[in-house]
Amino acid sequence: MKKVLLLILTMFCFSLYSQTKGEKFTILKIGNKYSKETIVSAFSKADMCGNFYFSKPNDITLDDGAVVRFLSKTEQGLTSNLSDQCFVVDNYKFDKIVWSISPNGFVAKGHAVRPNKAYIKE
């Protein structure tokens, strides 16, 4: 009886530990412009599909220095409500983009500036 009770208790503890409650991101660093609440609110309502790796985290930097980590599919576990189409292969290289949060609370994605080859003189 004690072994069964111990087994049930162990399984219960592991199930609590392994659940991330549907979290898709975590904040690693708070910058000097946005509060934690602002960041959580903006990223909770944003569609960040395509910015997640399958088995490694993806860190993005906001314009104030804040760092937000998108959890991988592996880290999200069974609680993930994202489809497989929202995840990219682990060797995919994202451009270095500076993100921001607009005054109305939406995530804004900056774009990397690339030189136009038509205007480059060699």
Image (cartoon, rainbow, N blue to C red):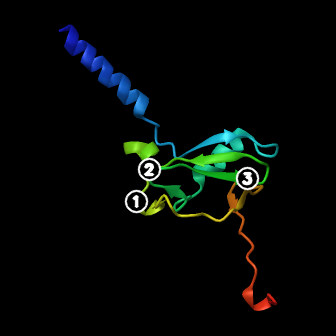
Which secondary structure lies at badge 2? Answer: helix
Question: What residue does disc 2 label?
Answer: 73
Q: Classify residue 12 as left or right of residue 56.
A: left
Point out the tag, 3 or 2, that comes first from the N-terminus.
Answer: 3
Which secondary structure lies at badge 1? Answer: helix
Point out the tag, 2 or 1, that comes first from the N-terminus.
Answer: 2
The quadrant of the picture occupied by the N terminus is: top left
Q: Which residue is pictured at 74% across the width and 84% down the height?
A: 116
Mark 2: which amino acid? Lys
The part of the image, by quadrant, that contains residue 95 is: bottom right
Front-most of residues 25 and 72? 72
Mark 3: which amino acid? Leu
Q: Do the residues labelled 3 and 2 touch (CB within 8 Å)?
A: no
Q: Examine the rendered structure and indicate whether residue 6 appears above or below residue 17.
A: above
| Label number found at residue 84 | 1
Q: Which residue is most to the left?
A: 1
Q: Classify residue 73 as left or right of residue 33.
A: left
Q: Where is residue 27 in the image (x, y as percent from the top left)?
A: 64, 41
Q: Which residue is most to the front?
A: 122
Gap in Å between the C-alphas at discs 3 and 2?
A: 22 Å
Q: Classify residue 35 as left or right of residue 16.
A: right
The part of the image, by quadrant, that contains residue 26 is: top right
Which secondary structure lies at badge 3? Answer: strand
Mark 2: few/some/many CA within 10 Å (<14, 14-19, 20+): many
Mark 1: which amino acid? Asp
Q: Position of residue 22 (x, y in %)?
A: 46, 42
Q: Which residue is pictured at 64% across the width and 44% down the height?
A: 40
| Label number found at residue 72 | none
Q: Are marks 2 and 1 in contact (CB under 8 Å)?
A: yes
| Label number found at residue 62 | 3
